Image: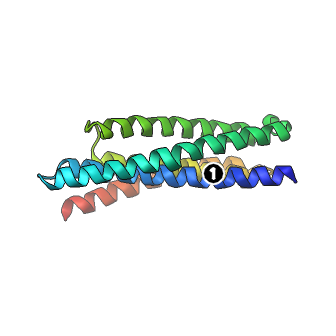
Amino acid sequence: MEYNYIKSLHLIFVITWFAGLFYIVRLFVYQIEAFHKPSPDKEILGAQFKIMAKRLWTIITWPSMILAIGFAIWLIVLRPFYLSDAWMQVKLGFVFLLIIYHIKCHIIYKQLQNDIVKHSSNFMRLFNEGATIILFAIVFLVVLRNAVNWIYGVIGILLFSVLLMLGYKFYKRLRERN
């Protein structure tokens, strides 16, 4: 029974972690676009987006990541045999990529809080898909873990990534025409 409670808490904090990652990058898009507006819009919008980003990042996203990882470790302590399963090893690889993605978001967050803009809003829109790809990969791995089909799921994620990139390029062209 303890396992199910810990697993539930783990899932709740994974969901809030992803929600924070999805929204913070969207705020980056808005911050970058506000940075290129004329005064006084630049200052007014920039200040508001900084407050929103700070609250999201420090109150929701970082704590959610820490709690999701903490409960994941607890689950592994309760069921260490999962570590020998191939699906779990691949999942942990994706979790590692998610942590790297989170750290990259933190670097961008700090830059934008200091009015340092190193990326375009278009780059951020594309960057936002990184968390989506990782989410799909992890969900498919967990759901299909007891079947050989998880390998096809990973291949499907790679193909999905290619489709996302093509969709992004199409969307970018549409935006440039308008």
Q: Residue furthest bottom?
A: 178
Residue 58 placement (x, y as % from top left): 48, 44
Residue 167 placement (x, y as % from top left): 39, 58
SS at mark 1?
Answer: helix
- Number of marks in the rendered image: 1
Question: Is residue 125 in view?
Answer: no
- The residue under the point 26% across, 36% down is 116
Could you say which is closer to the camera, residue 112 or residue 43? 43
Q: Is residue 57 left or right of residue 41?
A: right
Residue 118 placement (x, y as % from top left): 28, 36
Residue that label 1 marks: 13
Residue 153, placed above or below residue 81 = below
- The residue under the point 58% across, 47% down is 64
Q: Residue furthest right?
A: 1
Question: Is residue 35 in view?
Answer: yes
Where on the picture, by quarter, is residue 169?
bottom left
